[in-house]
Image (cartoon, rainbow, N blue to C red):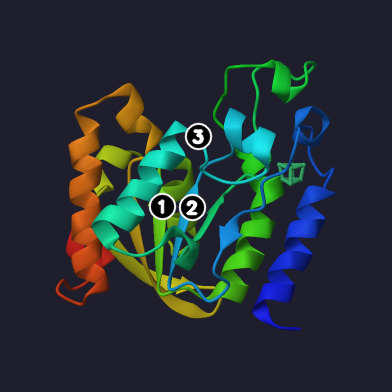
Amino acid sequence: MNKEDMLNKIAEEIRNCTKCHLAKTRTNAVPGEGNPNARIVFIGEAPGREEDLQGRPFVGAAGKFLTQLIEGILGIPRSEVFITNVVKCRPVPNPNVPARLQRGNREPTEEEIRICSPYLDRQLEIIQPDIIVCLGRHSAKYILSKIGFHFSSLSKIRGNVFEGVIGKKKVKVFVTFHPAAALYKPPWRKIIEDDFRYLKSLMEGKRTKITLEDFF
Ligand code: SF4
């Protein structure tokens, strides 16, 4: 079975998954999409309204900004990277109302992340990217914990790159704000854009890594 087939098999499992209560409210699960051989993987926290309706990651306003960052600043087509979330179904405020009828979102809980994250682990083991970009606190917290780093503040570590082994592969982990942050706090747009410029120089080998030891 090749990488694409293996990822499709996981995606099918996710679409049929009922391991947590989010299955009851979702319209569609959102496994993720992109190049099975992607060098770089982007990980958000969970699907929002548009993603739930379409079954695709980052297709709302925040997704449009992410696509601009990937294509405009990194200079690579969105289809060349892989984009997914830690939690694959949309967390909604009211657990008794279908997601399509609710406008608001909420952050995923620790329990939802614990139950759903093995799917992400399996995706990363198959893709084996060189760089993982964590978009937001939940993604950063989960991925950095896998390389032995526990943090309390996203603001303190964003814009930095860490190195570790995930899925038996040495990877660089880059942390930035979730693109939705730019929608709520317009000044953060420039911060995120600058982070992506740094990321581009990292991809081009113009920057060296900052290890956990260097950081502290
Ligand atoms: S959020 Fe994850 S664990 Fe919960 S139902 Fe969806 S795919 Fe399954």
Residue count near mark 3 (Cα–Cα under 10 Å), binned few <14, some 14–19, many ≥20: some
For mark 2, give the secondary structure: strand
Quarter holding residue 97: top right
Q: Earlier in the sequence, mark 3 or mark 2?
A: 2
**Residue 212 visible in the shown view:** yes
Residue count near mark 1 (Cα–Cα under 10 Å), binned few <14, some 14–19, many ≥20: many
**Residue 48 visible in the shown view:** no
Q: Does any atom of ligand 1 lie closer than 8 Å to the CB of label 2?
A: no
From the image, state whether disc 3 or disc 2 is nearer to you: 3
Q: CA distance from mark 1 to mark 2?
A: 5 Å
Q: Locate residue 45, reporting x and y percent.
A: 52, 42
Relative side of 133 to 19, left or right: left
The type of residue carrying mark 2 is Ile
The residue furthest bottom is: 1
For mark 3, give the secondary structure: loop
Q: Earlier in the sequence, mark 1 or mark 3?
A: 3
Q: Locate residue 174, reporting x and y percent.
A: 33, 58
Work out whether 55 lies above or below 134.
Answer: above
Q: CA distance from mark 3 to mark 2?
A: 15 Å
Mark 1 in CB contact with mark 2 (< 8 angstroms)? yes
The type of residue carrying mark 3 is Gly
Q: Earlier in the sequence, mark 1 or mark 2?
A: 2
Residue at the spot 71% in from the left edge and 23% down from the top edge: 100
The residue wearing badge 2 is: 43
The residue wearing badge 1 is: 134
Q: Locate residue 87, reporting x and y percent.
A: 62, 44
